[in-house]
Each structure stands twice: as C-alpha cells, then as structure tokens.
C-alpha cells in the first residue's frame, strides 16, 4: 500500500486476488506473455488475420450508432495511408470524454474485417507523447488479472505500471540468490538484471536469457533440496544389510515360479537386491504399467527379507486389493511354509489378537493389509521391508508413519502403476531411486479401445452377448464423484437395473464404495469366481483388481474421467490370453479437449505416452496420482514439460554442488543454505517423500 499507485484498496485486491503482499511478491509476479510493441504499422499494411499491431494517427470523427445491445461508439482513425474504424461496445461515456481529435495516438489491438472495413474492437489507446516511456518500448509484458481486479481498473497494464513504479523507486541492486561460481560457470544473467528484463525486455535475446536464468534457478533449488534430503538420509541412516539369498527365494524360483519372469522383472529384482545388500536403506520407486507383474516382484523381494530373518509387509490402498494380494501370495508360497496373514479394518478380533502376538514374536513373516498396518498398535519384531502398492493412494504422512516403525528403518519399495512422466518423477520422487518395468508378460494381446456414443447401445449389447457366450466377463464402470454423489449413485443403480433387464440370462453384481466391506467382498468374489458375468461398479475397481477372465471394460460417461484414470480402468482387462476390449461411452456433444482424450485412448495403450499427454493437457499440478503426494511447491515460471532440459541441467548442477560440498558447508555455498531455508519457510511442505 506504500508503493506509488497502490493505496489500501488496491493493496487489498492484490492480496486477495493474487496473494501479493510484499514488493518481492510483486517482482516475482511474472508476465504470462509479451507483445511486440517495437513496430508501428501503417494502415496501408494492415490485413485481416494479423495479430495485435500498433498504429499511429489521429481520430477524425467519433459517433454513436445502433440501439440497445448493438449500441456502439465508432471512431474513424487515419494515419494518412488509409482509414480504420475503432469500435467500442462498453464504456462509451469514458471513451467519448477522453478521446481528443487534436492529439496523435498510438492505437494497439487486433484488426478484423467487418462489412469490408478494417476495424479494431476495444483498442488500447495512448497519447503518443505519453507513450514514449519505458512501458511502451520493445516487448510489452502482459499479466494475468482476475475479473474483479479488472473491474477495479487493476488490469494487466496497471500491474505493469506498478512494477514500473517499484523499479523506479527502488534504486539499489536486488541481492543475488545464486553463488558466483554457478553464475560464472553457466554464464547466467544476474538476478537483478533478470528480474528487470523479465518485466521490461528490450529484445527477445536478452529476454530468453533472463527467463532461462529464472527457470534454471527455480528448478535447481528444487533438485538441490531433494538431493540434500537424500544425502542427509544416506549419511544418517544405516539400512539392514540383506546379504543372504537363501532357501525361500531359491526354492520359490526353482520350483514354484508360476511363469518365466520377464527380462524387466529380472532386472528390477536385481536392482533391489543390490540396494538391500549395500548397507544403505533402500528407497525405491517401482514403476510398471498395469498388468506388468509388479506383485510377483514384490513377493520375491519379500522372500529376500525372509531369507535374512526379517519380516516384510505389503500395504495396499483398498480392502479388495489387499485381500486379493493375500490370496495370490498365500497360494504362491503355500509349499514354502511361509507364515502369511491379512490385516484389514474388518479382520476379526480373535484373528487380530493372533496376528499381533505372532508379529511381536516374529513368527509371522509376511503381513499384507490396508491402512490398518499403519496403526501404532501394529508392532513388528524385525521389520526389514515395507512394500507399498499403488502408492498414489497413500499420503506422505502415512508413509512416514510406516517408516518410523523401527529404530532402524526398513527398506522401502513403493510401487505405482500410474506412469509418471520422467520430469515429474524427478521432481516429486527425486529422492527415490527409480526402477521401471517396461515390458509386459509375453502373449498379451493389446487391448482394443473404442469410443461409442450412447445411441449405439443396442449394437454394444449384441457384442457383449457374444463375448459372454464365449465365457468372458464384463465390467461396467460409472463415475462417482463426491460433489455429485447423489446423481451418480442414481446412474449407477439405474445402470445395474438396466443390465439386469438387458441380460436376463446373466448374473449381474454391483460394487460401490458405500457398501459394507463384507458385502463388497462377497460381490467381488461372486464375480472373480466366474459365477457372475457382469459387474457394474464405481471406480473402486480402478486399482489392482485382477480377474484375468474379464475381457470387456465399459466406461460410462467416459468424458468425466481423466486420461490416467481411464488408463487405470482399462488396465483391469487384458490380463489373460484373450483379446480384450475397452469401450468408452460418451454423449454426442463433447468439448474439444474431451474428444482429444478419447482419441488418445483409442490410439495408444502406452501408459507413459498417456501420462505425458495428460500432463501436457492439464499441467502437472492436476496430474492424477500426484494430487496427494502433490507437487510440494508451486512453480512460478517453469513448466516441467516444456523445460525438461533445464530441469535436467538443474539436477546435474545440484549434483555437482553436493558432490563437492555434501553438507553445503563451504563459505561460497552459504547463499544456497540461506535460499533453501527461505524457500522451506515460504512453501513449507517440502516433505520427505518417504
Ligand atoms: P500389476 O503390475 O498391474 O500389479 P500384476 O502383478 O497384477 O500386475 O500381474 C498381472 C497379471 O500378470 C497377473 O495375472 C500375473 O499373474 C501375471 N504375470 C505376472 N508376471 C508374469 C510373467 N512373468 N509371465 C506371465 N504372466 C505374468
Ligand atoms: Mg498391482
């Protein structure tokens, strides 16, 4: 409010609308685009279809025409080479009182042709004499403002003026935030200049250098922060060393392996064995598309823990999934005589007591469960490994609690099927090592995806009948979003009734989140056993459910799902040897973006490609699966997709710095410490990932 041009009212608006409360906030409120104002066109050069241009000339007549909503003010504007019309539909009084035929004006706007006459609607106008300030030279910065701000005359131009005033009144140099050795080595623009140029660029070249410096700095500090955390952990924490590869793993591998491992499965298991034998604590993220066989990897890694006389646990996000893991794993290790148990919210009291006892005594070797595993009452004897499946459902804090269950923290393996673009992974999980299963088990036929409008329902039903007669099973999924829960629920139950009516010869089950766990399990079981042919469900089945005989996935109101979620749902089929299908049902009228989503889904099965597309379309902040783990900061100027190369460089420079000075103790690097502390205070939440 002390800045010339602000005052209490505008100060309040800036605070409410843009969270700008200090000079620094204002300086770091960066333009979103630039318009070239270095060139003035003559009217004879103007063509329709041009972008924003500037003209210089006089107004030689001004008149009001039309009535009601069509009422407008039209000025005839000339520069001696021709005429254009300037048109206003709003603020007519103001225009009339402020335009004066005696002055020369600079007019700025986008020309179009109407009735054979070139016109510019709602142009920006400045008297030529007054426009010769810094504000109107070269590339002009444009800033985002809200409707509320605009209606209070705080538009882009006004913001620009405020930044200008700030730089006018601030005579000093803005203190540098990067160490001199980095600035010199990479020939970066110094902060003081970069900040001035970003608001008042003279030319594209210096603007690009200034932007580079600011983007680099932002990404560099994120990487430095993550890598420093990782360093601290490596220095301070000793991991259990698993040196033995003993009876359990060998016996399983040689006698009970249900199928040949894929090359990728072998490779990631090797990577983990190496981690766990190194004396350091393993913190690894295992990424693998749906159906790539992560469960088997988890089991084999748990067997390594058992071979070293440790316990292991596997945590899943839903009861259905935990139960399924339990059944799969218990069956696979039956012959090995491994003691496995399942712990969920609905475990019976007596069973619970038994589990607790055996966990403490060490008799229980593998515990599989849901969030129930995190409770403080669950105490292990010697927990050596924690596997977290479908990681995105767990918040950072929940993971941290598991982590604290031992004095010596267990090795941690986080598994996710939500493919995360590499750049984002580097940023969100930058302190975890990453393994990727990039190969599906052999013999899988790629899922065929089709996009149908509702009017093809009959055709769809004929197709379903064919599939079911071949012995296949069908999922029908409805969206259920909390805000519109009632409506969605109605759609779901109507869909259930509809399927029962349309397929009287079939057994149809329904599964949704509001059912009691026991009912849900029962319905799931009826479907998994093959007794029911059709399952109508909400997205509770999104994660992990494995019924290899199900070959058709119908997604109702597919327009309401994001790309990653569609991909997750589709992954529920295509798990057996049969040709599988995914059918996206939508209404006929679709937004451009939705159409594009459907097009991507029908074109590719590649989870990474889909994740990249998702990130491009929605921005990383909204990316499915990262909402909870979240980007722990907001990006002011960089964009992880666009700036992936600068991100790479930021990481590399951060690595170099830490290599030479692991704990940032050298005098040269104190500026880094200060800056990290400052960022941590401003943005909080730079939480440890696990
Ligand atoms: P996800 O990675 O999605 O968790 P799962 O572990 O559920 O995948 O595996 C999907 C299916 O593939 C399961 O039915 C599993 O038994 C099977 N599978 C896993 N590994 C292999 C393999 N190497 N060869 C053949 N089938 C496999
Ligand atoms: Mg899985």
Image (cartoon, rainbow, N blue to C red):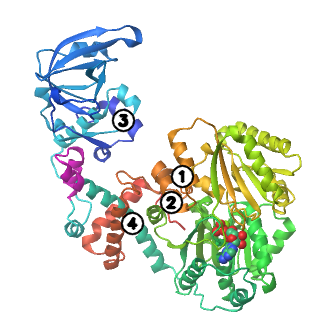
Q: Is residue 166 above or below residue 279?
A: above
Lateral position of residue 556 relative to residue 510, left or right: left
Within the displayed image, which quadrant is ligand 1 positioned in? bottom right
Image quarter in which the N terminus is found: top left
**Mark 2 or mark 3, whichever is nearer to me:** 2
Percent from the top left, x then y, of residue 363? 77, 83
**Sequence-wise first label, 2 or 3:** 3
**Sequence-wise first label, 3 or 1:** 3
Contact? badges 4 and 2 (CB < 8 Å)? no
Label 4 and label 3: CA atoms lie apart by 31 Å
Lateral position of residue 501 relative to residue 106, left or right: right
Label 2 and label 3: CA atoms lie apart by 34 Å
| 191 or 316, nearer to the observer | 316
Residue designated by label 2: 609
| Residue 454 magenta | no
Q: How many marks?
A: 4
| Residue 199 magenta | yes
Label 1 and label 4: CA atoms lie apart by 32 Å
Residue designated by label 4: 223
Contact? badges 2 and 1 (CB < 8 Å)? yes
Residue at the image position 68 percent from the left and 56 percent from the top: 581
Percent from the top left, x then y, of residue 359? 75, 77
Principal secondary structure, stretch drawn in magenta: helix
Crowding at mark 2 (Cα within 10 Å: few <14, some 14-19, many 20+): some
Q: Is residue 351 above or below residue 525?
A: below
Residue at the image position 29 percent from the left and 9 percent from the top: 64
**Mark 1 or mark 4, whichever is nearer to me:** 1
Q: Which residues are magenta?
A: 189-209
Percent from the top left, x then y, of residue 521? 82, 58
* Res. 145 mark: 3
Q: Is mark 2 within 8 Å of ligand 1?
A: no
Instruction: Determine the image quadrant of residue 376.
Output: bottom right
């Amino acid at each position: 409010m002390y800045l010339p041009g602000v005052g209490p009212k505008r100060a309040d608006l800036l605070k409410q609308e843009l969270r700008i409360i200090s000079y620094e906030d204002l300086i770091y409120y960066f333009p979103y685009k630039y318009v070239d104002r270095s060139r003035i066109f003559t009217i004879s050069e103007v063509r329709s279809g041009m972008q924003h241009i500037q003209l210089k000339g006089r107004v030689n007549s001004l008149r009001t025409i039309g009535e009601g909503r069509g009422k407008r003010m039209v000025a005839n504007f000339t520069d001696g080479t021709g005429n254009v019309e300037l048109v206003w539909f709003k603020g007519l009084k103001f225009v009339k009182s402020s335009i004066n035929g005696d002055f020369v004006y600079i007019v700025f706007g986008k020309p179009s042709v109407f009735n054979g006459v070139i016109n510019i609607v709602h142009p920006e106008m400045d008297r030529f004499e007054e426009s010769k300030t810094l504000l109107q030279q070269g590339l002009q910065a444009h800033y985002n403002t809200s409707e509320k701000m605009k209606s209070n005359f705080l538009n882009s131009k006004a913001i620009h003026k405020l930044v200008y005033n700030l730089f006018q009144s601030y005579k000093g140099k803005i203190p540098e935030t990067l160490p001199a050795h980095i600035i010199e080595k990479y020939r970066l623009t110094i902060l003081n200049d970069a900040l001035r140029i970003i608001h008042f660029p003279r030319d594209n070249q210096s603007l690009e250098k200034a932007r580079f410096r600011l983007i680099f700095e932002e990404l560099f500090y994120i990487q430095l922060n993550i890598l420093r955390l990782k360093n601290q952990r490596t220095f301070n924490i000793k991991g259990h060393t698993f040196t033995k590869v003993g009876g359990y793993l060998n016996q399983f591998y040689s006698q009970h392996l249900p199928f040949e491992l894929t090359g990728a499965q072998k490779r990631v298991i090797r990577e983990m064995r190496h981690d766990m034998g190194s004396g350091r604590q393993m913190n690894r993220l295992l990424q693998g598309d749906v159906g790539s066989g992560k469960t088997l990897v988890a089991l084999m890694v748990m067997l390594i823990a058992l071979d070293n006389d440790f316990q292991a646990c596997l945590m899943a996000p839903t009861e259905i999934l935990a139960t399924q893991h339990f059944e799969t794993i218990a069956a696979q290790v039956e012959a090995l005589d491994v003691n496995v148990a399942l712990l969920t919210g609905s475990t019976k009291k007596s069973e619970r007591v038994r589990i607790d006892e055996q966990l403490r005594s060490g008799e229980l070797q593998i515990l599989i469960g849901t969030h129930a595993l995190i409770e403080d009452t669950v105490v292990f004897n010697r927990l050596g490994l924690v596997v977290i499946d479908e990681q995105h459902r767990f918040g950072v804090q929940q993971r941290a609690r598991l982590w604290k269950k031992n004095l010596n923290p267990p090795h941690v393996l986080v598994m996710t099927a939500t493919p995360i673009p590499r750049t984002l992974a580097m940023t969100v999980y930058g302190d975890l090592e990453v393994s990727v299963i990039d190969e599906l088990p052999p013999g899988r036929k790629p899922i065929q995806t089709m996009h149908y409008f509702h009017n093809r329902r009959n055709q769809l039903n004929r197709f379903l009948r064919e599939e079911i007669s071949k012995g296949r099973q069908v999922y029908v999924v409805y969206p259920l979003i909390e805000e519109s829960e009632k409506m969605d629920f109605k759609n779901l139950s109507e869909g259930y009734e509809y399927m029962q009516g349309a397929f009287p010869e079939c057994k149809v089950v329904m599964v949704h989140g509001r059912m009691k766990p026991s009912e849900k399990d029962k319905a799931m079981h009826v479907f998994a056993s093959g007794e029911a042919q059709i399952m109508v469900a909400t997205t509770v089945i999104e994660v992990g459910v494995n019924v290899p005989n199900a070959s058709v996935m119908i997604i109702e109101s597919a327009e309401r799902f994001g790309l990653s979620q569609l991909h997750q749902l589709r992954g529920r089929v295509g798990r057996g040897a049969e040709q599988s299908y995914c059918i996206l049902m939508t209404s006929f009228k679709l937004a451009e973006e939705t159409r594009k989503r459907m097009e991507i889904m029908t074109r590719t099965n590649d989870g990474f490609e889909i994740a990249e597309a998702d990130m491009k379309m929605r921005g990383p902040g909204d990316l499915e699966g990262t909402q909870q783990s979240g980007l722990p900061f907001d990006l002011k100027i960089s964009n992880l997709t666009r700036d992936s190369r600068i991100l790479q460089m930021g990481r590399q420079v951060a690595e170099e710095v830490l290599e030479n000075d692991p704990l940032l103790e050298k005098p040269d690097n104190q500026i880094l410490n200060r800056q990290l502390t400052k960022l941590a205070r401003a943005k909080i939440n730079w939480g440890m990932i696990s």
